[in-house]
Amino acid sequence: QVQLVESGGGLVQAGGSLTLSCAASGLTVSSVGMGWFRQAPGKEREFVAGVSWKDFRYTESVKGRFTISRDNAKNTVNLQMNSLKPEDTAIYYCAAHRTLLPVLTTPSVYSYWGQGTQVTVSS
């Protein structure tokens, strides 16, 4: 049984940093495609960042500020978020799909999802 558990969310001032972590069980993060998505109130869930084998991808609004990485020893995928802005406020979700390449940006193709973690950036 696949389980994804996010942690690391919280409240931070604009310009601050947070690191989200997604702990996976039932799959190996280095062998599947992993992604981070977010959903703000009243908005659709959107792709933030993803990694699949050696393919890394980011949505334009977070390029240069967010970094996705894998810790194969811990079987986790992390999202380092720097220079946070109020518009980054959302629930952040970790997701996985078994197609290794390329990074997929459409939520519907991801088979497994975590419960989400709230990120709030105050101005």
Image (tube, rainbow, N blue to C red):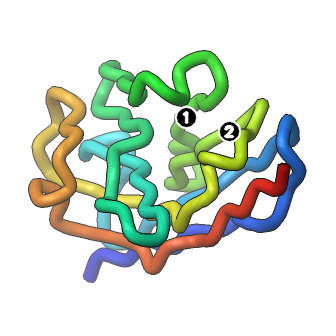
Q: Which residue is mark 1?
A: 69
User: Hey, which quadrant is residue 28 in on the image?
Assistant: bottom left
Q: Could you tell me how far apart the alpha carbons at marks 2 and 1 are, in whole angstroms? A: 8 Å
User: Hey, which quadrant is residue 21 in on the image?
Assistant: bottom right
Precedes in sequence: disc 2 or disc 1: 1
Disc 1 crowd, CA 10 A, few/some/many (<14, 14-19, 20+): some
The answer to whether 94 is drawn above or below residue 98 in the figure is below
Residue 112 in the image: x percent, y percent?
A: 25, 69
Q: Which residue is mark 2?
A: 80
Image marks 2 and 1: residues in contact by CB distance under 8 Å: yes
The answer to whether 7 is drawn above or below residue 121 in the figure is below
Q: Secondary structure at mark 1?
A: strand
- Residue 75 vs residue 87, the one in the foreground: 87
- Residue 46 vs residue 52, the one in the foreground: 46
**What type is the residue that disc 2 sits on?**
Gln
Residue occupying the point 82% across, 64% down: 11
Q: Secondary structure at mark 2?
A: strand
Residue 80 in the image: x percent, y percent?
A: 68, 39
The answer to whether residue 31 is left or right of residue 21 is: left
- Residue 99 vs residue 9, the one in the foreground: 9
Q: In the drawing, what numbered circle is on residue 23?
A: none
User: Hey, which quadrant is residue 107 in on the image?
Assistant: bottom left
- Residue 117 vs residue 70, the one in the foreground: 117
The answer to whether residue 91 is left or right of residue 102 is: right
The answer to whether residue 56 is left or right of residue 15 is: left
Residue occupying the point 22% across, 40% down: 105
Residue occupying the point 54% across, 29% down: 62
